[in-house]
Image (tube, rainbow, N blue to C red):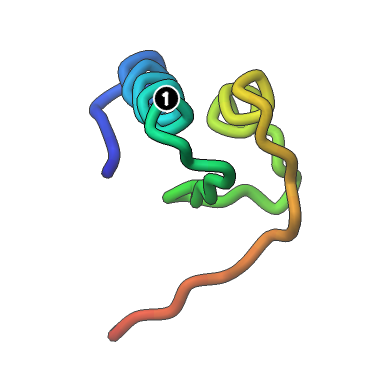
Amino acid sequence: MMAPSYKLDRRICQVIVREGLGLGARYFVADIEAPSETMNTPAYDAFSAMGFRKLYRRSLFGPR
């Protein structure tokens, strides 16, 4: 899901992680909707602050 702002998106993800941990989840995977070649947008900072680490950058493909 994607919220209309980084701040709200971050808050939603924080709640998902907190609730998931409370329910026994051990792993989470996050995907940034609009990846950056340099991996330096606010989304990367937000996920890093929540304890996520960058594994790799991927490109998504769809119809033209």
From the viewer's perspective, is residue 56 above or below residue 60? above
Q: Callout 1 environment at 10 Å: few (<14), some (14 to 19), or many (20+)?
A: few
| Closer-to-camera residue (62/44) | 44
* Residue 14 position in % (x across, y down): 43, 21
Left or right: 22 as drawn, with respect to 55? left
Left or right: 24 as drawn, with respect to 41? left
Left or right: 35 as drawn, with respect to 5? right
Residue at point 42%, 50% (across, down): 33
Residue 18: name its quadrant.
top left
What residue is disc 1 on? 22
Residue at point 32%, 23% (across, down): 12
Left or right: 30 as drawn, with respect to 37? left
Residue at point 45%, 29% (across, down): 17
Give the residue type that dot 1 points to. Gly
Q: Which image quarter holds the N terminus?
A: top left
Element type at marker 1? helix
Q: Which image quarter holds the C terminus?
A: bottom left
| Closer-to-camera residue (28/7) | 28
Residue 44: name its quadrant.
top right
* Residue 26 position in % (x across, y down): 57, 42
* Residue 23 position in % (x across, y down): 38, 33
From the viewer's perspective, is residue 8 above or below residue 35? above
| Closer-to-camera residue (59/15) | 15
* Residue 61 position in % (x across, y down): 43, 79
> For the view shown, which residue lies furthest in the front direction?
24
